Image (cartoon, rainbow, N blue to C red):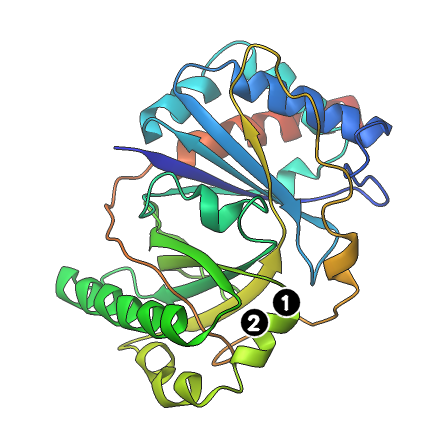
Amino acid sequence: MGATEIAIFPLQEGKYPDDANSTAGQVLRDTLNTLTEQPGFQRAYWGREVENPNTLRLFVDWEDVDAHISFTKKDHYKPFLERFGQIAVLDKAKLFHAHLSPHPPDEALSDHVSPVTEILNLYFPTDYSDADQNTLVENMKKMVSIIEKEATTQKASAGGWVVEDIEIPGTSEKGKCYQAFIGWDSVEAHMDFRNHQAFKDNIHLLRQAKDLKHLQVVHYSGTQVDKGAGGVADLGGDASTAIQGEVLNPIEEGKSAPKSRSDGTTTKNNDDLKGAANSLKKERQGRGA
């Protein structure tokens, strides 16, 4: 089953890869080129958060979760991390997977269709039942349908359950997470729709979801990278300059409209993923770097 790796990296101060000709841009280019060469790789999307420009979002479509896990166990994975670690703070990275619908989620995650993507995360207890998960998915479908009908500035959507149990922001506990991605013309377009009566009449479908523990929204503008013989030819320039001028602090509980259509699984691969990054961190500490 097609799967999307979701990776969130704090960037080292001032090391923004938007300029393909900069040192940071070259590091990201090398990182993406290595990814495109891996068995099971399909495509990737990257961009900095609008609200938090020091945070890089990377999404990678794989044939399945095992294809990505297999890559993390290869001999060349460690030098791959070391190279990327020249611009990213690896020991603070968050890595997990989701089965998104549709797959690929390119129209929602890439600026070739969606200039800006709303990233909506809904967190629930780890024992959230299949029935409750299905209800949430159906309510999400209803909300997306309303957005598609009423918002002319909405471009695309995708979403699904995260495979692993992940940390709930602001807490020390883990939970299940549903991630929704809605493409918009701009951040402002998304904010304007929140004043629409259709939004006000239906947002309860999400804000009042059973056992909802946390709701979080950020935005990013994604550049798509496809697999090809020529590798990564262009990082897409400064993908976020225009939209970052539009403002906003991260939107927390009860502040956003999402979308999507999918359901997910519950295998656990997060420990395998973090093992590689943690081993690199320990080695660096041993060298005093």
Asked if the residue under mark 2 is in contact with the one under mark 1, i.e. CB atoms within 8 Å, the reply is yes
Query: Circle 1 sits on which residue?
Result: 187
Which of the image's four quarters has the N terminus?
top left
The residue depicted at 84 percent of the width and 45 percent of the height is 13
- Can residue 170 be seen here? The reply is no
Q: Is residue 189 above or below residue 202?
A: above
Is residue 129 found left or right of 288 in the rendered image? left
Query: Circle 2 sits on which residue?
Result: 190
The residue depicted at 55 percent of the width and 53 percent of the height is 114
The residue depicted at 75 percent of the width and 51 percent of the height is 54
Mark 1 to mark 2: distance in Å?
A: 5 Å
Which of the image's four quarters has the C terminus?
top right
Q: In the image, which disc is placed on residue 243?
A: none
Give 107 or 159, whichever is nearer the viewer.
107
Q: Residue 232's quadrant in the figure?
A: top right
What's the amino acid at mark 1?
Val
Is residue 58 found left or right of 145 in the rendered image? right
Is residue 264 found left or right of 156 in the rendered image? left
